[in-house]
Amino acid sequence: MRAALPAFACCALSALCCAMPLAAAAEGATDRVAVLAQTGAETDADDFGNLALRGGALFGYQSHLQHWGLALQNAHYSQDGWSKNVPGIIGLYRNQRADTLEGLRAEAGIVSVAGHARPVGDITWSHRPRESTGVELIAAGDVVGTRAAIERGITYGLLAASVEQQFGARVTGILLGGWQPFTDGNSRTLLRARLIVGLLPEQGLSLQARWRQYRSSDRDVDDAYFNPGEYRNWDAGLSLRRRVGGWTVSGLAGAGRERVENDSWQTTGVAELRAEGPLAGKVRIAVNLLYSRAAGFAATDDYWYSSANVNVIVPLTR
């Protein structure tokens, strides 16, 4: 059983976060309204699924990096004949520089789950005080993605901060610390570290090594979700991030080891692919595919998790 991240999570928590953001040319400030459509599908070894749909309008639209808007969404969770809808309304705001991605990216709203109105969101503020140094402040929250947690209306929050430092032309280190409270009274302290070494910078090929761990304040959550007292994971792999025409293509493939409590270390694996760019005219599309084999979010043996997300923005001219 897993505690899901937001269905449309920002890259600050993604496996594809890289040290240097790719520059994206902002479109001219001629478009003022755009239509937003998003869909995401998740499934895992427990046959737990989630089909998320979101649609809305973006205003003050200058580019995919500068706009604000409002959207309606619904997450349809299902497992073995059981299903539940979690509808919500979300406000959107984005104002980031195209060259460094400095600025604010925010989603915040309310969802209805098990008769409760719960706040959800995904907010990241990024700043680079120096060219070689980056800082991020993160606030997020969502429904815990298991059948028991949804029936009880359990959600979680996240407060985190990360620091990125480049060492020379090819080496970058990132350190993140955070606190994750749950509405059932449990909480976790998080620590994540990443080392990125540029192997072929001209081709966008890098080597990444990661360490992730958390500790829970309350191990007894009545089987609502996977919640060991301590979880640790390290992995390493190759990542690719480059421009192909007007598109940005990135990918990650790696393997590692994980440990739950004091049990033996187990093998893990992860693969992710993302593509973003213009589809037709000023229409913009982003596609993200993820596959992971790890017990970090479930107690099932040989657990796996997969997801696919598509985001489309259609600007409307005046």
Image: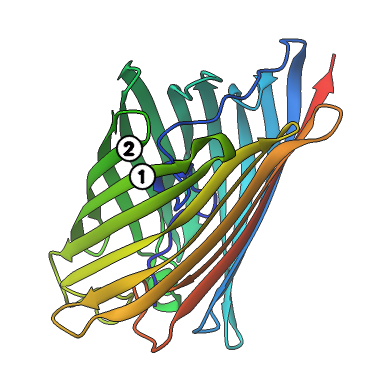
Three-letter code for the amino acid on which mark 2 is drawn: Val
Task: List the residue tagged with mark 1.
Answer: 196
Q: Looking at the picture, tell me which residue is in the foreground, 12 or 203.
A: 203
In the image, residue 200 lies at what x, y percent?
50, 41
Position of 272 with respect to 29 (left or right) is left
Q: What element carries label 1?
A: strand
The quadrant in which residue 129 appears is top left
Lower position in the chain sequence, tag 2 or tag 1: 2
In the rendered image of this protein, does residue 216 appear above or below residue 125? below
Residue 171: numbered disc: 2
Position of 166 with respect to 105 (left or right) is left
In the image, residue 229 lies at what x, y percent?
15, 72
- Residue at the spot x=33%, y=37% of the render? 171
Quadrant containing the N terminus is bottom left
- Residue at the spot x=31%, y=55% of the render? 210
In the image, residue 12 lies at what x, y percent?
41, 42
In the rendered image of this protein, does residue 44 appear above or below residue 39? below
Q: Looking at the picture, tell me which residue is in the foreground, 279 or 227.
A: 279
Mark yes or no: residue 182 visible: no
In the rendered image of this protein, does residue 242 appear above or below residue 305? above
- Residue at the spot x=36%, y=44% of the render? 196
Three-letter code for the amino acid on which mark 1 is drawn: Ile
Colouring rule applied to residues: rainbow
Q: What element carries label 2?
A: strand
* Circles 2, 1 touching at the beta carbon (< 8 Å): yes
